[in-house]
Image (cartoon, rainbow, N blue to C red):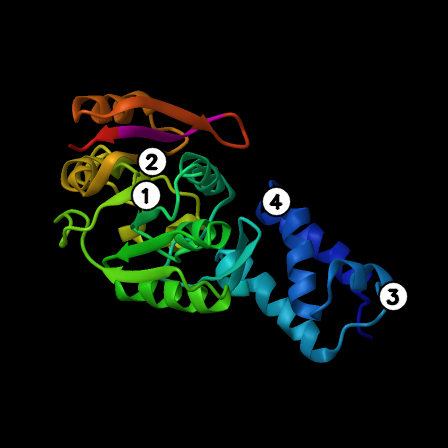
Amino acid sequence: MSQTIFSAYNNLKHNLEKIDESDYVFEAKQIIKYVTGYTNREILERYTENLTAVQENKLIAILEQRKMRYPLQYILGRWDFYGLPFMVGPGVLIPRADTETLVEKALDLIKDRKSPKVLDLCTGSGCIAIAIAKNRPDAEVTALDKYDVPLSYAKKNIELNKVENVTLSEGDVLKGAENDKKYDLIVSNPPYLTKAEMENLQPEVSYEPDTALLGGEDGLEFYRAIIENYKSALKENGIMAFEIGATKSQDNLAEMLREAGFKNVDTALDIENRQRVVFGTYNNI
């Protein structure tokens, strides 16, 4: 006999807790929503309904993938970020809640600028660029990445979120800007893990592309390159803003910005009160 939605949810929680104690309740809810196609409200209204054979098999397949610590976001193929849906899959970095701090700060930094020009470097899924563009329809946002897979996801996500003010660009940030455009804000969540950190990744993170994670021997390679190669692409009093890792000392990046001539260098805290964003202003005259 098929199990009900309620019993399936409880069994799922029990099995997921063995895999990862941190988010098993949240994961169970997301999986049940995905398998049934129901909203949270519909699940509460229909919790005594039996799962179909197809739904049961889908549930079993998902649980087997999670036992291998395959990321839930890749399994579902879609993940929310800053209140917006994003398609994700192998070859693209999974959007994380921590990065919403960078979007929030970016929007604050350009709130008084009319029709701002924004450049998002190492865009990946396009989540930062699209979230900024969606909240600032008057902005002109360029999203740059080196690799085809992230760019293909970014393209899908631009269409999914119906934003018309984001332009995709292919390029290597380590080689620098390829045109003379000037921006009010350059924002980036670059690869920033050290080689040592790459050897101790959570199992789920190991499925994500190394190219989106490894920031060189000390994790600062991309920060150095972006500051050096792109500060000339800022307008007068233009701003650069970066995400940093939870274990990354913000002092290193802040000092790099100051040494490069940036003023008003400061940081912003994430939802767990950790330094997550470093930013500064550059008088490019």
Spatial separation of the CA atoms under disc 2 and disc 1: 7 Å
Is residue 216 visible in the rendered structure shown here? no
Q: Amino acid at mark 4?
A: Asp
* Residues at marks 2 and 4, CA–CA distance in whole angstroms: 30 Å
Q: Quadrant of the C terminus?
A: top left
Residue that extends furthest to the front in the rendered view of this protein: 114
Give the distance between the C-alpha atoms of the residues marked 4 and 3, in whole angstroms: 24 Å
Q: Which element type, helix, strand or loop, lies under badge 4?
A: loop
Which sits earlier in the primary sequence, circle 3 or circle 1?
Answer: 3
Q: Report the predominant secondary structure element of the magenta stretch.
A: strand
Residue corresponding to mark 3: 48
Mark 3 to mark 2 CA distance (whole Å): 49 Å
Q: Would residue 200 be found to the left or right of residue 23 on screen?
A: left
Q: Residue at x 38, y 42 (%)?
A: 201
Tell me where residue 242 sits by quadrant.
top left
- Would you say 267 lies left or right of 82 here? left
Q: Are marks 2 and 1 in contact (CB under 8 Å)?
A: yes
Q: Which residue is mark 2?
A: 241
What amino acid is at disc 2?
Ala
Mark 3 vs mark 1, foreground winner is 1
* Label 3 Cα neighbours within 10 Å, binned few <14 / some 14-19 / many ≥20: few
Q: Which mark is residue 23?
A: 4
Query: Alpha-carbon neighbours of circle 4 within 10 Å: few (<14), some, or many (≥20)?
Result: few
Secondary structure of residue under mark 3:
loop
Marks counted in the figure total: 4
Residue 35 located left or right of residue 79: right
Question: Which residue is labeled 1 in the image?
Answer: 188
The answer to whether the residue labelled 4 contacts the one labelled 3, judged by CB atoms less than 8 Å apart, is no
Q: Which of the marked residues, 2 or 4, is nearer the chain's N terminus?
A: 4
